[in-house]
Image: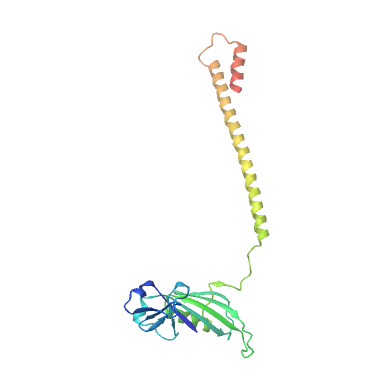
Amino acid sequence: MSVNLYLNDNVRKSELFKSEPYRNGTGDQMTFDGMSIFGEKGRLHIIWGNDDPIPEILKNLVEEVSCHEVIPQMGHRESGIYRHETAECELTPEDYGNAKREKPMYRLKITAKNLEDIQAIMHKIKTGTISPDESYEGNQHGKTRQQLENELLSTRQELERLREERKIAISYRSDFIDAHEKNALVRNLANDLLGTFRWPLVNRRSLAKKIAKILD
């Protein structure tokens, strides 16, 4: 099993950190308290043993622990993402095609904040006492690109239909308000004619013009 202890930037500030360039100019040879430090992919890390406890001088410098392990398929384990405390493990079946192995293998890729959580999740997976949070073995519910494009087209058409209906509704509402206002003006005119205020002379042509003006 391969375990890496990834270190934060404070390691470079420690008096125990040493860095000397290689003679061939290919990089720097880095150590911390005599332990070799590697810097691939821009992250400083120390290769560690699974059963070796992390010493106190390193605990405040370790920001992440990663582990790669291969275990035999002694029993069925569901492929997917497993989580326990700070640990996250991706489990996938793997067959090396090795005739000496009677059963295929499981590959585990684990990351955590500490070594104890890695050991705990690995033990749970081996004993079958944990289930994945995200299974790789469920039914596939994803849609094809064509299905998504058809749904998008249908949604756009429905949106356009709703916009047209809204325009018609606004137009009807405007016509209703206009008719309501005209009706109120005609009623007010009628009330003036029938009220206590008596017009001395009502000219039918003049009255007709007033009503027509209101309706227009």
Asked if residue 67 lies left or right of residue 203, the reply is left
Residue plotted at (36% across, 74% down): 12
Percent x, y for residue 151? 65, 55
Residue 22: name its quadrant.
Answer: bottom left
Residue 14: name its quadrant.
Answer: bottom left
Q: Is residue 4 above or below residue 170?
A: below
User: Extreme top residue here?
Assistant: 200
Percent x, y for residue 127? 52, 84
Q: Nearer the viewer, residue 169 or 179?
A: 169
User: Extreme left residue here?
Assistant: 15
Asked which colour scheme the image uses, the reply is rainbow
Residue plotted at (66% across, 56% down): 149
Residue plotted at (52% across, 77% down): 109
User: Extreme front residue here?
Assistant: 24
Asked if residue 106 lies left or right of residue 45, the reply is right
Count of picture labels: 0
Q: Nearer the viewer, residue 101 or 208?
A: 101
Residue plotted at (61% across, 35% down): 171
Quarter of the image for the C terminus: give it.
Answer: top right
Q: Nearer the viewer, residue 29 or 21?
A: 21
Percent x, y for residue 47? 44, 82
Q: Is residue 163 above or below residue 24?
A: above
Percent x, y for residue 158? 64, 48
Asked if residue 38 lies left or right of residue 186, the reply is left
Q: Nearer the viewer, residue 111 or 156?
A: 111
